[in-house]
Image: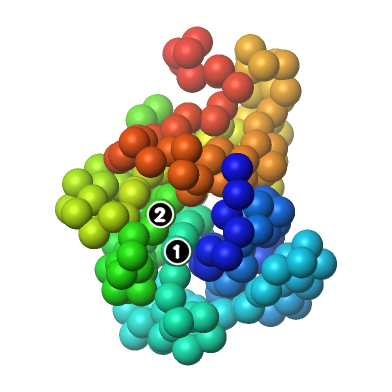
């Protein structure tokens, strides 16, 4: 599998799953744009790691909740590379509260970043993919399972998976292949915001048939496969990477 000569943009690429995706795509030969929201130092470190693998890299800061800044991010990519071959919508945010504790501002923020932004990014990316390309959206098992304190994020990820299917059909005539990867419990910085983090990690590790938790690298390898020529006929699919735990039900 080789992605040599291709240009990839990974939103939320400075750390965690996003960083692992950046590095895996770089190992396969792609030039990588590291999208980030706040931590320039982490983004720069990831870009340095990408360059160490022998490909080009660029960091781009963007507030994905702001359509104007989303457009600016893609204009920067266009100025630097002239095109885009791969978009990975990895950046995500949300508020972990119950339905009765959530406020409208929490709901709007989560939907803007997790569902609206990938749509806006896909629109901009399609403009830079005149010869086709790949879009991969990062979802989670909470899109179909009910997880504690996960209402807003779970609904936003369900919307993201629906968006994946619609885009897969609409963009197919342009040669753009759209899929998603849904991960099980992955121990990243994002999980530290969950009040029941330790419980989630312990339960998942014990119950996962594969015998261990999903790692960011597991997610990254799935993304790289969906961006490869070997996945040409995989369209609108949500690839589950969870070590088999979802097979056991709740």
Q: Is residue 1 above or below residue 189?
A: above
Tell which of 126 and 250 is nearer to you. Answer: 126
Q: Is residue 71 above or below residue 128?
A: below
Residue at the spot of label 2: 134
Residue displayed at 43% across by 38% down:
231
Dividing the picture into quadrants, the one containing residue 143 is: top left
For residue 36, say whether it is visible: yes
Q: Quadrant of residue 31?
A: bottom right
Quarter of the rendering containing residue 133: bottom left
Residue 6 % position (x, y): 53, 64
Name which residue lies at 38% across and 41% down. 232
Q: Residue at x 34, y 60 (%)?
A: 132
**Residues at circles 1 and 2 in contact by the CB criterion of under 8 Å:** yes
Instruction: Return the x and y of residue 23 as percentages of the image width and height.
Output: 70, 56
Task: Name which of mark 1 and mark 2 comes first in the sequence.
Answer: 1
Residue depicted at 19% across the width and 46% down the height = 169
Q: Is residue 120 visible?
A: no
Label disc, if present, on residue 105 of the rendered structure: none
Residue farthest right in this picture: 52
Figure quadrant of the N terminus: top right
How many labels, in total? 2
Kindly report the distance in space between the C-alpha atoms of the residues bearing marks 1 and 2.
Answer: 6 Å
123 relative position to 210: left or right: left
- Decide: few, some or many residues near mark 1? Use Cα within 10 Å; few <14, some 14-19, many ≥20: many
Q: Which residue is mark 1?
A: 85
């Amino acid at each position: 599998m080789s992605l040599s000569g291709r240009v990839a943009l990974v939103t939320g690429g400075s750390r965690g799953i996003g960083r692992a995706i950046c590095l895996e795509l770089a190992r396969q030969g792609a030039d990588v744009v590291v999208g980030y929201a706040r931590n320039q130092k982490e983004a720069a470190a990831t870009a340095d790691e990408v360059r160490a693998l022998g490909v080009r890299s660029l960091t781009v800061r963007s507030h994905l909740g702001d359509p104007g800044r989303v457009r600016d991010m893609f204009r920067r990519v266009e100025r630097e590379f002239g095109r885009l071959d791969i978009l990975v919508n990895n950046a995500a945010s949300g508020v972990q509260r119950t339905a009765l504790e959530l406020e409208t501002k929490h709901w709007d923020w989560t939907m803007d970043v997790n569902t609206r932004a990938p749509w806006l990014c896909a629109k901009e990316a399609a403009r830079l993919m005149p010869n086709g390309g790949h879009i991969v959206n990062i979802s989670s098992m909470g899109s179909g399972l009910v997880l504690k304190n996960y209402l807003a994020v779970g609904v936003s990820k369900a919307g993201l998976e629906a968006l994946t299917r619609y885009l897969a059909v609409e963009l197919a005539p342009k040669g753009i292949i759209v899929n998603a990867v849904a991960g099980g419990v992955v121990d990243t910085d994002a999980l530290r915001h969950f009040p029941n983090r330790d419980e989630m990690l312990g339960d998942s590790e014990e119950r996962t048939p594969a015998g261990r938790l999903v790692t960011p690298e597991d997610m990254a390898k799935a993304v790289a496969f969906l961006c490869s020529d070997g996945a040409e006929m995989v369209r609108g699919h949500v690839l589950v990477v969870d070590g088999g735990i979802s097979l056991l039900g709740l």
